[in-house]
Amino acid sequence: MSANTRDAAPLLRVEGLRKHFALTKGILFAKTLGHIKAVDDVSFDIRAGETLGLVGESGCGKTTTSRMILNLEDPTEGRILLDGEPIHGLRGEALSAYRARVQAVFQDPWSSLNPRMKVGRTIAESLIVNASRNRGRGDRAQIDARVRELLLQVGLRPEQAQQYPHEFSGGQRQRVALAAALASRPKLIVLDEPVSALDVSIRAQMMNLLKDIQAQDDVAYLLVAHDLATVRHMADHTVVMYLGKIVEQAPTASLFDDVRHPYTKALFSAVLVAWPGQAAEEIELRGEVPSPLDPPSGCRFHTRCPYVMPHCSQREPALREVSPGHFVACHLFE
Ligand code: SF4
């Protein structure tokens, strides 16, 4: 059964997505040395108003996947559909309409804030672009009112619209970035490590704010994170990636109470803070992630897996449903 069947009409559908980057040598007569398989046959759904957590070590393909969803990269194969419509090949107005519906908040809010622009102006810019796309006049009083409303929604004061980004703390800047993302009333926001640069004391506030906004606006989140505590707190559904492949995918409660894949177990073992239901079995993740230029044959995790069997290096395990909605790609579950 495909992991996509859990919902008949998802907001976003990712189908058989692949992204292979050519590795070349030389400039004029570039020779292709090989292909980096950053994302290799990835499928999942995101429903309206839900949070999907995408986790894995650095280099697992989660960032490349989110860049394709943001339409910043074209896939090598596969497709992405928003409300049933493919997103590739969008140009001009259709592309800006897509960008309004799918926004992003990144780990470093400086990347989306102009240091020389008052934050009210930054937020207003998205409103002006949106109004002109909808053939509206972008009425100044309405835009100012909406900027104030957005600042209040993210827990800031309306008068802070007159301040510059450097006058805010890191947590406040992330709130401003969120207000700017919310300005176009998106259906989906890609949250790329949204709290990992914040002080631990501020993280919970930011996560609770994101959940409150989701409850109010019915916005969906794709949460890209390496921190399992953030994913557990935020995500309804979690996808674990290793070397460009999905190795485990489940409702978050099911995953955290009954982790199955040896790689996911290893990720959990690396977390110092335990939680009820955490697997008692500990697996130490040894060695580096192999190169995606020449990934291991069969199961890509076999070079690091303590349960490796002779056929693991020869046959690639399929993603199978081991309990309702819980999918695992490992020969131990065949
Ligand atoms: Fe380990 Fe084999 Fe399962 Fe891969 S398929 S995770 S190598 S047991």
Image (spheres, rainbow, N blue to C red):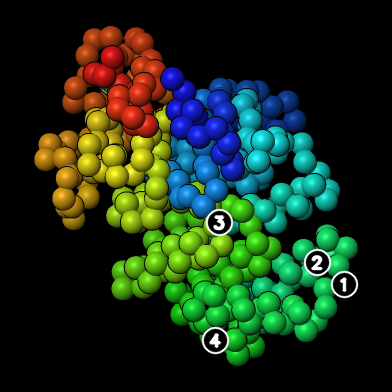
Q: In this view, does 107 lie above or below 296?
A: below
- On screen, residue 202 versus residue 92, left or right, reads left
- The mark that comes first in sequence, 3 or 2, is 2
Which label belongs to residue 157?
Answer: 4
- The mark that comes first in sequence, 4 or 2, is 2
Residue drawn 12% across the image and 36% down it: 281
Q: Which residue lies furthest to the left in this view?
A: 280
Which residue is under mark 1?
137
Q: In this view, does 218 lie above or below 95?
A: below
Foreground label between 3 and 2: 3
- The mark that comes first in sequence, 3 or 4, is 4
Ligand 1 position by quadrant: top left
- On screen, residue 225 versus residue 10, left or right, reads left
Q: Which amino acid does label 4 sit on?
A: Arg
Secondary structure beneath label 4: loop
The CA span between labels 4 and 2 is 24 Å
Q: What residue type is labelled 3?
A: Val
Residue drawn 47% across the image and 23% down it: 2
Contact between labelled residues 1 and 3, with CB atoms less than 8 Å apart: no
Contact between labelled residues 2 and 1, with CB atoms less than 8 Å apart: yes
Contact between labelled residues 4 and 3, with CB atoms less than 8 Å apart: no
Which residue is under mark 2?
131
- Residue 137 lies in what quarter of the image? bottom right
Q: Which amino acid does label 2 sit on?
A: Ala
Q: Choose between 31 and 98: the one closer to the eye.
A: 98
Q: Which amino acid does label 1 sit on?
A: Arg
Residue 328 picture location, percent across and down: 33, 26
| Quarter of the rendering occupied by the C terminus | top left
Which residue is under mark 3?
219
